[in-house]
Amino acid sequence: MAEDTGTMSADATDLPFSSFWQTEPGTGHALRNLAAAALVEAAIQKGEGMLTARGALAVRTGSRTGRSPKDRYIVAEPPLEQTIDWNNVNRPLSAQVFERLTAQAQEYLTRRTLYIADGYAGADPRYRISVRVVTETAWHSLFARTLLRRPEPSELARFRPDYLVVCLPNLRPEPSAGPLGDVCVAISFCRRTVLILGTAYAGEIKKSVFSVMNFLLPRRGVLSMHCSANVGNDGRTALFFGLSGTGKTTLSAEGNRRLVGDDEHGWTDAGIFNIEGGCYAKTYKLSAEHEPQIYHAIRFGSILENVMVSPLSREPDYFDKAITENGRATYPLEHIESSIVQGQAGHPSHICFLTCDAFGVLPPVSRLSLRQSLAHFLAGYTAKVAGTENGIVTPQATFSTCFAAPFLPLAPMIYAQLLYERLAKHRPAVWLINTGWVEGPAGQARRMPLEYTRAIVRAALSGQLDESDSVQEPLFGLRIPSFCPGVPQALLRPRHAWRDPAAYDAQATLLRRQWEEKLAAYHDFLSQVPDNELCSAGVSPA
């Protein structure tokens, strides 16, 4: 095994699905690297979906309309099993069970016409990996083609995968394979294979590849990040960390800034790079008025997942959540006007931690010190919003370490240490932005209006908030700007915005207690971090 990549030197014939590891897959039933138009045509002919009025392919994923984290496993096999942070997210699957699932899938594959999509994960050639996605449906192949970075024709001619993803939504794991349900997502780092069985939710493909990159990149000294990124007219880069539903895609798709990527990035010694070649946006309540870039990106070559569509007009209804609140749109990065398709940018001058606070006690915006930045990164406090995971129907407060716990195979301190080194060296300004509830908790109040959050982000990135006086919030020590252009001053101080200050105090104390419990494991590390203010002056434009 090569320590810096986590791959093995075994010949392709020793790996599962050996015929798919060759430059030319050895099967007569596989359609390889079809163009978007051909995949759309095949999907419609096979009854997998229908075209909408603007040309997007609309599909449904059945009972699973979000990720299935309780059905995700990592294969426990030497020598890499000692490097995995085993927990209730990274659950072990024996190599023997994985072999039985592989045998079941291989037998199933012999009776199906398959689609193969080859692509890269990682815009920086130094750190990218080659990924081959094998699916039984045309639309999943289109999804993979959209989300991965697309090779040039000359590169496809000699393409050899580093990792293989096999997605078979209509194949349920056999009971004899082990104590599994009707869905299984299994990642084998030693065999460089991801097996997705029993679920049509395409986000499993995306996040499995992200999990692989979260395993490989830190081992090479690169910080992998669950964040979006964009670049301003001044050449300065901004990052937006957060879980699904906190606003990464929406806030990074800003008309006066160029989009690098909406969800997954790496931070190297040279700057940041996008891991993906496309975007995966939530569509519930999407409108041309409030999110024009995303709205107009959904056209031919895009996929609408679990969105209601009129059978007569073929117009999607983004306000109808009859299927799920987790309706999704997949589209190539180039569908966003003025995006940075090459997917690389300089070191960030600003970092925004997006939290969807279900307690409703955190301020809409606050400035973080170095120690606070790492504390919020390790805590990863937010709320899971409806639909993002199977079974989530109402907002649920959660702590997701590094804002990415479901996708981190390694110990959180590995990612935190890499972030610490970069913050100390490049000294970006770090902001905590609450896109969740204001004036009260979830169920009793409203979410922060998008136009206010956009105003906050603009003010932070332009330096306007640096000019504002600040007050210190007592429980979390957060520095709250006294003024922000375009935002009612009353909303900036949460306790003042609540009708019942005593109720606010009770909610804030409860959150503080949970916060302290989450961070107790990292006390020694955080106590050694200087608690100085970060500045944005130390980063040169890309």
Image: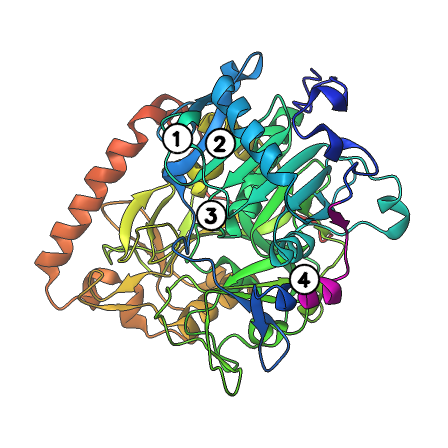
Is residue 232 in the magenta section? no
Amino acid under disc 2: Ala
What secondary structure is marked by label 1? helix
Q: Is residue 116 left or right of residue 463?
A: right
Q: Which residue is mark 4?
A: 332
Which quadrant would the N terminus be assigned to in this image? top right
Q: Residue at x 33, y 58 (%)?
A: 386
- Asked if marks 4 and 2 touch (Cβ < 8 Å), the reply is no
Segment tinted magenta in the rendering: 29-42
Residue 535 in view (yes/no): no
Dot in front, 3 or 2:
3
The numbered dot on residue 416 is: 2
The numbered dot on residue 175 is: 1
Amino acid under disc 3: Thr
What secondary structure is marked by label 3? loop
Location of residue 452 with respect to 391 vertically, above or below: below
Across and down, in percent, residue 421 comes to 57, 31
Q: Which residue is mark 3?
A: 199
Front residue of 46/320: it is 46
Dot in front, 2 or 1:
1
Across and down, in percent, residue 504 comes to 15, 57
Tag 2 or tag 4, which sits nearer the N-term?
4
Q: Residue at x 42, y 63 (%)?
A: 468
In space, the residues marked 3 and 2 are separated at their CA atoms by 32 Å
Amino acid under disc 1: Pro
